[in-house]
Image (cartoon, rainbow, N blue to C red):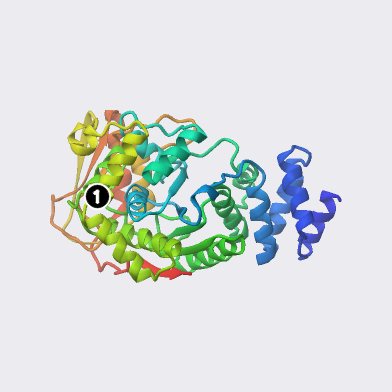
């Protein structure tokens, strides 16, 4: 078998066999196939696409390219949730303990933030003492006892995805539905959960800018997940407005704690109920409505907060700051952003808001950048709110005073005041 023939076949619109896909994935991971040939195949896939069978095969071989987490000990109760990335998205901190409080086993591997979106692992490390690196025995013992554990991804999970994504990033082949699908789903398959709920976001702060594109991606990932033997569903959600009011690591943890304590409702509360409800419904074999009812009870009764506290303690986190969020380290400097005219906020550019938070120190430009856990933004007003001249739109926080001014300019450019706001539902559609 030759890589040349595989490239030519896909270039001409042919359907690759399982053996051909296995050959190129395994050969590339082993270093036997050069970047330039894989780049050519990726471009051919970008233009020619892949069938469901091809995408399923690619997903499975990418998942099998490294370690496969075996969660069979927990039976069919394992559940996972994945977001395609957004601004202010701290739902895992709320959804995971809700699901665990309802009897599910959430053994989750989360990534770190890059660019304008945040990472769950970074947020958790804002809690003093929390360990994102555990041995396999520690990880499984905590999941067994508590029902939830969240760690950073193992270095040998889906090495094929790491190599292929790095190549896609520099060859303009990122925006391919089968390649995005196999990238996301291979990690979920390798992570071992039997039930997977996807939060596929659309809008200015999301990878997919329109709900139509997000629906295409959601349908693809749900189909491939199910074809790979995992019960999979997806929610298509709005990211034209930041989720909640906090953007930045410790600020988002504090907001999540407030939701868990019953101190805050709104969009973050609603989407957390919907995501947890879908996880519960898939896992227990009940309707989405019944699942959401169980999720709401777990959150409103305080059961989810107690489970969150137990989870954090089990991974070494200081529960004193969970009980009293004023103990989180605060930034040395802050700046208020004031409205320069009156009117309704007609739109917010989420990507710019996420970029402003990254400039403050809350995010990374490269994966090796050190982040400022206290940096970020607290929004005071959002799309559809009326503001008067001089009203505070947001407060910026950073431990580097020089970063405030440049971040402020970015934030101001993200807010449009005047005209009519477009009303959009928080959840556009559920894909089963």
Instruction: Identify the residue at image location x=46%, y=32%.
Output: 133
Of residues 307 and 380, the one drawn nearer to the viewer in this rendering: 307
Position above or below: 121 against 343? above
Specify whether 307 is left or right of 60.
left
Quadrant in the rendering for residue 17: bottom right
Specify whether 301 is left or right of 38.
left
Instruction: Identify the residue at image location x=25%, y=36%.
Output: 397
Q: Position of residue 141 (x, y in %)?
A: 44, 38
Of residues 310 and 128, the one drawn nearer to the viewer in this rendering: 310
Specify whether 142 is left or right of 168.
left
Quadrant in the rendering for residue 285: bottom left
Of residues 51 and 386, the one drawn nearer to the viewer in this rendering: 51
Residue at the right extreme? 1
Q: Where is residue 244 in the image (x, y as percent from the top left)?
A: 27, 53
Q: Where is residue 82 in the image (x, y as percent from the top left)?
A: 46, 53
Q: Where is residue 320 in the image (x, y as percent from the top left)?
A: 22, 32
Instruction: Identify the residue at image location x=34%, y=69%.
Output: 290
Q: State whether residue 174 appears in this view.
A: yes
Q: Is mark 1 on a helix, strand or loop?
A: helix
Instruction: Identify the residue at image location x=28%, y=29%.
Output: 399
User: Which residue in the protein does label 1 denote?
Assistant: 260
């Amino acid at each position: 078998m030759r890589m040349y023939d595989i490239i030519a076949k896909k270039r001409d619109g042919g359907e690759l066999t399982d053996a051909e896909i296995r050959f190129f994935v395994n050969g590339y991971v082993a270093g036997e196939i050069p970047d330039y040939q894989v780049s050519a195949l990726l471009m051919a896939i970008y233009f020619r696409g892949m069938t469901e069978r091809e995408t399923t095969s690619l997903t499975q071989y990418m998942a099998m390219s490294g370690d496969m987490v075996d969660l069979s000990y927990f039976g069919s109760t394992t559940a996972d949730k994945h977001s395609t990335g957004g601004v202010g998205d701290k739902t895992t901190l709320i959804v995971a303990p809700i699901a665990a409080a309802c009897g599910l086993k959430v053994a989750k591997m989360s990534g770190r933030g890059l660019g304008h979106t945040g990472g769950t692992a970074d947020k958790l490390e804002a809690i003093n003492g929390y360990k994102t690196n555990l041995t396999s025995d520690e990880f499984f013992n905590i999941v067994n006892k508590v029902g939830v554990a969240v760690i950073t991804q193992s270095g040998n999970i889906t090495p094929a995805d790491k190599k292929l994504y790095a190549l896609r990033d520099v060859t303009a082949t990122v925006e391919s539905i089968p390649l995005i699908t196999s990238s996301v789903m291979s990690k979920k398959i390798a992570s071992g959960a039997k039930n997977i709920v996807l939060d596929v976001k659309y809008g200015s702060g999301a990878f997919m800018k329109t709900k139509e594109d997000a629906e295409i991606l959601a349908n693809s990932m749900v189909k491939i997940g199910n074809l790979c033997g995992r019960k999979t569903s997806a929610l298509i959600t709005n990211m034209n407005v930041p989720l909640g009011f906090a953007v930045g690591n410790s600020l988002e943890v504090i907001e999540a704690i407030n939701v868990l304590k019953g101190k805050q409702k709104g969009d973050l509360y609603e989407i957390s109920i919907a995501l947890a409800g879908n996880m519960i419904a898939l896992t227990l074999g009940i309707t989405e409505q019944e699942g959401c009812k169980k999720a709401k009870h777990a959150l409103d009764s305080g059961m989810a907060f107690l489970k969150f506290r137990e989870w954090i303690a089990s991974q070494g986190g200081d529960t004193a700051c969970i009980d009293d969020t004023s103990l989180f380290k605060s930034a040395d400097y802050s700046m208020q952003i004031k409205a320069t005219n009156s009117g309704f906020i007609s739109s917010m550019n989420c990507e710019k808001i996420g970029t402003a938070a990254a400039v403050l120190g809350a995010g990374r430009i490269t994966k090796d950048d050190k982040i400022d856990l206290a940096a970020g933004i607290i929004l005071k007003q959002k799309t559809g709110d009326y503001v008067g001249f001089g009203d505070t739109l947001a407060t910026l926080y950073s431990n580097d005073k020089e970063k405030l001014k440049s971040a402020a300019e970015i934030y101001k450019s993200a807010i449009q005041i005047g005209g009519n706001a477009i009303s959009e539902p928080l959840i556009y559609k559920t894909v089963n």
